[in-house]
Amino acid sequence: MDIINHLSTAPQDILDLRARRADAQENAQASFSALLEPENPGTFTYTERYAVAAFIAGITQDTRAYEFYAELLSDDSSLNLQPAITRGRIAGPYHDGKFVTFSVLDYGERLAAAFDFAHLLIFHPKDATPGAIGHLQEAGWSDDDIVSLAQLISFLAFQLRVIHGLNVLGGAEIATPEACEAKESNPNWQPGPRTELPDVVAPQGFVAHPLGWRPWVPAVPKDEMTEAQKDSLIKPERIDMPYFRLLARDPAALLARTRTDLDIFYNTDGGLGRAERELSATVTSRYNGCEYCASVHQARAKEEGGDAEAIDKLLADGPTADLGTTSWNALRDAALDLTATPVRFDKTNVEELRNVGLNELAIIDVINSASFFNWANRLMLTLGAPDVPRRFR
């Protein structure tokens, strides 16, 4: 069963168009299998995985997905998630340090910490610090399990947006998300003994030059990588990149995620152009606050023929900047509304995209591109920090 299609209400013709991105579809499902139902879940139990997924669907107000994941959870546990969901429903992305925590509820230290981390990743990943990693480590999460947890949360951010986008494209009426008041707390989480504290020079804003990235969770040493971990890199040169050696702690998830990425951004058969996909990635990254991803994908958008002046304006002025043309502004609006949490992408976005000449397959490419960077940004922002290379300091 393909879970995205199963949870979507889109008509078959829309799902058939989604299948034109066959590797993306197949590997989104492989990501579900790797993260929700791995053959060997290890110390990150099925109950914890289903509970986190149901919690995320609940706080992002996706009723159909919540019922699906809650049913999976009910096979393993009688956990009542409603108190956590009621406490956690707010709106994002926001970048102002308002945390919602769950230790006051009766879920035990380990699961409450997972909900704390999930809420951070879903609504305000820009506020992540090494203290969030230390918080998980103190609650008993191993470094391998922290990577799998971050992947699971970030994958759900992608999966639920694709489902929502397909539903809207298929003509579904989407209810206005409930307005909720943030419940502020200052958890004062601290790095733990295993938390990496790299010496980095943070970028002073969004930049149009390359950045480095350093992890807070130890990456797998090159000489200790298994064959499965090496295979998950796909490109052998990635063994020199700490980000990929870190994600290789869960090789099945990394392999499926990378294959999803490659098809979404490089399969241009009949759909959206490469520059426009990279624009969607850049807008999403600018809105979520991910300087690293924005620096990479603004450059790729320019390399693919995108308007360099408009892209520089996006970096300098923010995600609502006027990009100069009706078509790019429509793409900008779609990426922003797909990135809002809860998602606010609706039929107006679809009409705007159609009005600038996009067909249904190209709109699916917009949905996939923006949704994928809601996956990528969360990993970059919450597992480590960007670093300005010496030549740009």
Image (cartoon, rainbow, N blue to C red):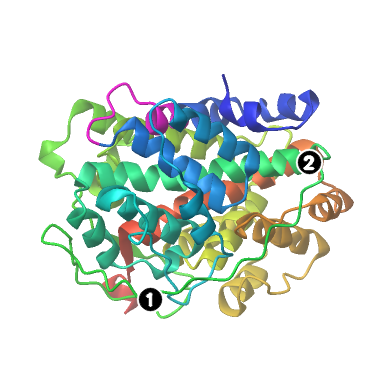
Mark 2 residue crowding within 10 angstroms, few (<14) / some (14–19) / many (20+): many
Q: Nearer the viewer, residue 170 or 213?
A: 170
Magenta segment includes 241? no
Q: Name the kind of residue labelled 2 in the image.
A: Leu
The picture places residue 301, in percent across and down from the top left corner, at: 59, 57
The picture places residue 334, in percent across and down from the top left corner, at: 71, 56
Q: Report the magenta residues as a range.
A: 31-43
Location of residue 178 by image quarter: bottom right
Q: Which residue is mark 2?
A: 169
Magenta segment includes 35? yes
User: Which tag is nearer the camera, tag 2 or tag 1?
Assistant: 2
The picture places residue 76, in percent across and down from the top left corner, at: 38, 28
Q: Is residue 292 left or right of residue 109?
A: right
Question: What distance separates the C-alpha of mark 2 from that of mark 1?
Answer: 38 Å
Mark 1 residue crowding within 10 angstroms, few (<14) / some (14–19) / many (20+): some
Q: Name the kind of residue labelled 1 in the image.
A: Pro
Name the residue rendered at 10%, 39% in the picture: 223
Q: Is residue 319 left or right of residue 139?
A: right
- Label drawn at residue 203: 1
Residue 25 versus residue 271 in the image, above or below: above
Going by the picture, which residue comes out furthest to the right?
A: 355
